Amino acid sequence: MASAHEIKCINKSDRINPHERIAAIGCVNADGSTWKLTREQAVAGIERGEWTFFVKVQNQIANVVVAVSRFGNKYLKTVADGEHPNNLLSLYECRY
């Protein structure tokens, strides 16, 4: 069974396309320790069924899924929640 983790921060790449701008995601464990995965590691973990990810915006949870760009690149995005289309891109930059 996949373990669920809240994404607290991201690191962006220099790419212009917003669908391919997330380079890494950061999470916090229950004990307060932090960890970070590259986009590629997160995508692979989701596809293997090892992890699920979500973001919380104003107490609303948006699940993160793997999508494929028109160029065939895999990226992370939140499931459309009707209010916050850029949940991931609006997170703070990871400092760890």
Image (cartoon, rainbow, N blue to C red):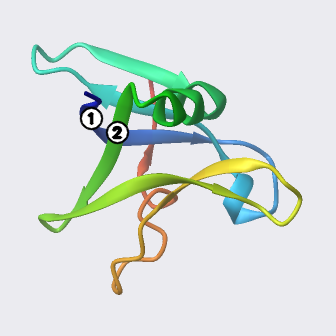
Residue 58 is situated, as x and y percent measured from the top left of the image, at: 16, 68
Counting other residues with Cα less than 10 Å from the Cα at mark 2, is it few (<14), some (14-19), or many (20 or more)? Answer: many
- State whether residue 16 is above or below residue 13: below
Give the mark nearer the N terminus: 2 vs 1. 1
Displayed quadrant of residue 2: top left
Residue 24 is situated, as x and y percent measured from the top left of the image, at: 57, 33
- The residue at the point 73 percent across, 53 percent down is 20
Q: Which mark is residue 32?
A: none
Kind of residue at badge 2: Thr
Q: Distance of mark 2 from mark 1, alpha carbons?
A: 6 Å
Instruction: Give the secondary structure at mark 2.
Output: strand
- The residue at the point 10 percent across, 13 percent down is 31
Residue 64 is situated, as x and y percent measured from the top left of the image, at: 41, 53
Q: Is 18 left, or right, of 4 in this rendering?
A: right
- The residue at the point 77 percent across, 61 percent down is 69
Q: Is 80 left, or right, of 58 in this rendering?
A: right
**Quadrant placement of the C terminus:** top left
Q: Are marks 2 and 1 in contact (CB under 8 Å)?
A: yes
- State whether residue 19 is above or below residue 11: below
Q: Which mark is residue 52?
A: 2
The residue positioned farthest toward the right in the image shown: 71
Kind of residue at badge 1: His
User: Of 66 and 34, which appears nearest the observer?
Assistant: 66
- The residue at the point 65 percent across, 49 percent down is 75
The mark lying in front, picked from 2 and 1, is 2
Q: Which mark is residue 5?
A: 1
**Quadrant placement of the N terminus:** top left
- State whether residue 85 is above or below residue 48: below
Residue 37 is situated, as x and y percent measured from the top left of the image, at: 51, 24
Q: Is 6 left, or right, of 43 in this rendering?
A: left
User: Of 3 and 7, which appears nearest the observer?
Assistant: 3
The residue positioned farthest toward the bottom in the image shown: 82
